[in-house]
Image: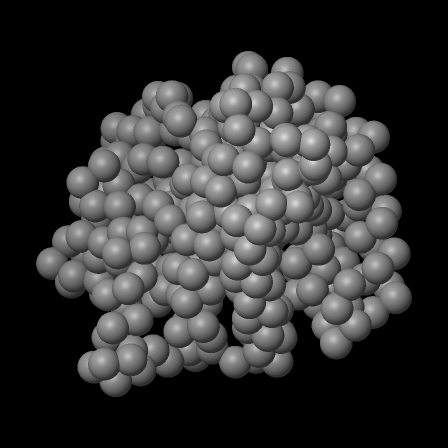
Amino acid sequence: MNNMYFTEEHRLFRQSLKDFLQKEVVPHIEKWEQTGQIDRFIWEKFGEMGYFGLMTPEEYSGLGLDLFYTVIFLEELQCIHSGGFAAAMWAHEYLAMTYLNKLANAQQKKAYLEPSVLGNKIGCLGVSEPFGGSDVAAMRTTAIKKGNVYVVNGSKTFITNGVYGDYIVLAAKTDANAGHKGISMFIVDRNAKGVTANKLNKLGWRASDTAELAFDNVEVPEENLLGDEGSGFVYIMEAFALERLVMGVNAHARAEYALEYTQQYMSEREAFGKSINQFQALRHRMVDLYSDMLLCKEFNYSTIAKMQQGEYVVKEATISKLKSTKMADEVMYNCLQFLGGYGYIEDYPLARLSRDSRLGPIGGGTSEILKEILAKIIIDKKQYKKPLK
């Protein structure tokens, strides 16, 4: 463990989390991968252990810990052989709950944040739409004020926890003519009248539920507006930095897990009278892969440290996701190859790891979109400023 970033308390937290995951989660992973539905009891156990409250203040049942506890949480979730289970957990805590932590008023925190910390309510984030995934400003979902309610119409897609969750942190246009300045955020109960979900059939992340959500004249009480009306785009852009960093950390962690597994396999697998880790072509390729993983890992740690100190790391977080997810896919491709025919067999971890990893360069902003964002920062000298609120 890197002592520059992690203390003895961090180390103890990591060990207790490892033990918890092995005892409480791993025995159920294959079932959840098959059914595509994670049993409710495990959310409550995560809540009891405080794992959903790492960034939430103590007054709302959280632990209020530094960001490197989040890093440990994310890294260990990548080592239990289910990207889908990991996604369901971190989408709840670092997509939905991020907005509640930052924007919710005291009443909303009592009604939604605290139960989320305790694992009694499961949240999802509704931003992406069928006609505009990475282009947030082009969203079509509307929330029109009528009396003391907002009436929501539209659809969202690729929503993790959207089928079995309890509430949606929803982005919608409250002013259709104001462009990105017309977007607002709401808390919408998943079982509200007019909300329907279609469960999507995915290549990977099979343990998690991913929904296309439809909103047909859904009435949302005005007290469920999150933050200020019209400020939704700014809130989303700020939250993207953490989301991209989360996906960067996930990527280096699953790559490290795959490399460790593959090195062990190579030390035991023999060809022509010697273990295959003694063949120069394979040894040198492994060195390249490990070096790339370590570069991403160290960059991600330094970016987390900057965020912890209050810096607005939009550039670094975007680079983190772009480079780490590409690296992880390269690692999975090669590690599967190192296993030969066994890499293609579902009983070995690389088949699922390859499927689950492939979402990295797509979700949370495609690599192509991220490159254009970075081009604006690096070439056009565009500056993204941290919102005042």
- For residue 14, side relative to residue 315 (left or right): right
Q: How many marks?
A: 0
Q: Position of residue 228 (x, y in %)?
A: 38, 64
Residue furthest to the front: 272
Q: Nearer the viewer, residue 351 or 239?
A: 351
Q: In the image, 61: left or right of 197?
A: right
Residue in the image at 41% along x and 67% along y: 319
Structure colour scheme: one colour
Q: Residue shown at 66%/65% (left/top)? A: 67
- Residue closer to the observer: 172 or 74: 74
Residue 132 image offset from top left, x and y in percent: 21, 45
Residue appearing at x 22%, y 62% in the figure: 180
**Foreground: 127 or 69?**
69
125 up-or-down from 372: above or below: above
Question: Where is 125 relative to 346, above or below?
Answer: below
Task: Specify whether residue 306 is in view.
Answer: yes
Extreme residue in the bottom direction? 381
Residue positioned 77% across, 36% down in the render: 21
Quarter of the image that includes the N terminus = bottom right
The location of residue 43, given as percent across then percent down, is 68, 33
Q: Is residue 66 left or right of residue 194?
A: right
Choose between 296 and 113: the one closer to the eye.
Answer: 296
Do we see residue 44 in this rendering?
A: no
Picture quadrant of residue 260: top right
Above or below residue 112? Residue 241 is: below
Direction left: furthest residue: 177
Q: Is residue 239 left or right of residue 30?
A: left
